[in-house]
Amino acid sequence: MSKVVKGAAEAIWDINDGATLMLGGFGLCGIPENCIAALVKKGVKQLTCISNNAGVDDFGIGLMLQQKQVKKMISSYVGENAEFERQMLSGELEVELIPQGTLATRCMAAGYGMPAIYTPAGVGTEVANGKEVRNFDGKDYLLEHAFKADFAIVKAWKGDTFGNLIYKETARNFNPLMAMAGKITIAEVEELLPAGQLHPNIIHTPGIYIHRIFQGINYEKRIEQKTIRKKV
């Protein structure tokens, strides 16, 4: 079966109301812009989104928040999105804030087929409420369950028709972990190459994890906060 699809609309055709999605990227870097736009256009609602952050008001997951498509947001950082804050404080949006390392490791556990992990992050804080605590060698750890995502949507720099992926710089943060973890993983890439064109030693995500892949278009690649040094 060919993994290559024509574009974002075809890639997300079976994402329906109530789905749980992982969305790769770090800040606005390496986010699946084309798939997010397709989800906004489709109008699918009641989504649970697992992502390091929630984008900004008019870009990334923020576009889905504007359309009230997200029921629950599972993130580690949300400080750049005023609409997110408004929905959370008004009770319109369910929010689960997770330490960033725990978020990454719960993605990894899902990819590795592990049901849960133990982590010291969050012990003695609100993060620990209602969770099992176990002591190992005199130190307390929280039991955290692996994520269960219907779809993982990632963005890579280069990919091939087998689904092998290479990420560029900061985009390599959450994308590789999430690519392993979805029941169905969708990859959009800046450059799609024939199978065999990517050297095996530089592949970050093997194609066995990828179910659908397409070459994206019109990437904005926004910067959240641009800092410019003054000329001397």
Image (tube, rainbow, N blue to C red):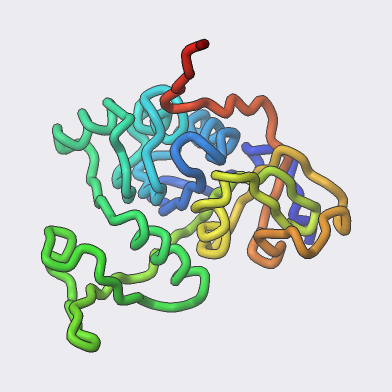
Locate residue 114, reporting x and y percent: 44, 78
Q: Is residue 207 above or below residue 88?
A: below
Q: Is residue 232 left or right of residue 17?
A: right
Q: Is residue 18 left or right of residue 154?
A: left
- Residue at the far top in the pictured view: 231
Q: Is residue 152 above or below residue 220?
A: below
Locate residue 21, reporting x and y percent: 45, 51
- Residue at the far front in the pictured view: 232
Q: Is residue 7 left or right of residue 22?
A: right
Q: Quadrant of residue 84?
A: top left
Q: Nearer the viewer, residue 229 or 98?
A: 229
Quadrant into which the N terminus falls:
bottom right
Q: Is residue 186 above or below residue 225?
A: below
Q: Nearer the viewer, residue 207 or 44?
A: 207
Locate residue 17, reporting x and y percent: 41, 46
Locate residue 72, reporting x and y percent: 29, 46
Q: Quadrant of residue 146?
A: bottom left
Q: Nearer the viewer, residue 226 or 2?
A: 226
- Residue at 22% x, 32% y is 85
- Residue at 56% x, 34% y is 33
- Residue at 20% x, 37% y is 88
